[in-house]
Amino acid sequence: MQAFQNLTTDQLREVIQGPGDEWTYEMRREPQEIIPGLLLGPLQASKSLETLQSLGITHMCESASPPYMRHL
């Protein structure tokens, strides 16, 4: 944690978002591959069978806290 205290705002942004302009706000409703084979996305994306099939998603794990928890 202490290593991040000396970073500039731009450096911290790069640590959080990754290098370059790979992600845009318009992509907020789409699953994002965070490491090869592991996607992270909003609940809305999990409701689209076309999206799940096109990405080859076979399993899902929900991570939410009350009152937002829903059963998939």
Image (cartoon, rainbow, N blue to C red):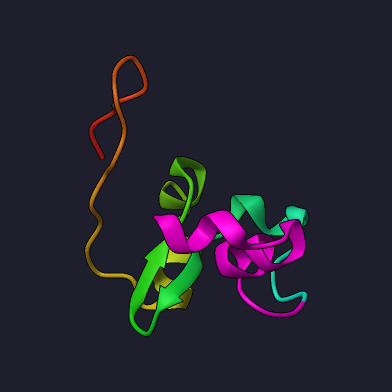
| Image location (x, y in percent) of residue 61 | 23, 52
Q: Is residue 7 left or right of residue 38?
A: right
Q: For the C terminus, which image quadrant?
A: top left
Taking the view exactly as shown, the residue that stands out farthest to the top is 67
**Seen from this angle, which residue lies furthest bottom?**
36
- Asked if residue 47 is positioned above or below residue 14 in the image, the reply reads above
First to last magenta residue range? 1-20
Q: Quadrant of residue 5?
A: bottom right
Quadrant for the N terminus in the image: bottom left
The part of the image, by quadrant, that contains residue 69 is top left
Magenta stretch: helix, strand or loop mostly? helix
Front-most of residues 44 and 40: 40
User: 62 left or right of 50?
Assistant: left
Residue 25 image offset from top left, x and y in percent: 75, 53
Quarter of the rendering containing residue 37: bottom left
Which residue occupies 31% across, 33% down?
64
Residue drawn at (26%, 44%), measured in percent from left and top? 62
In the image, taking residue 56 as reference, residue 55 lies left or right, namely: right
Vertical placement of residue 65 versus 47, above or below: above
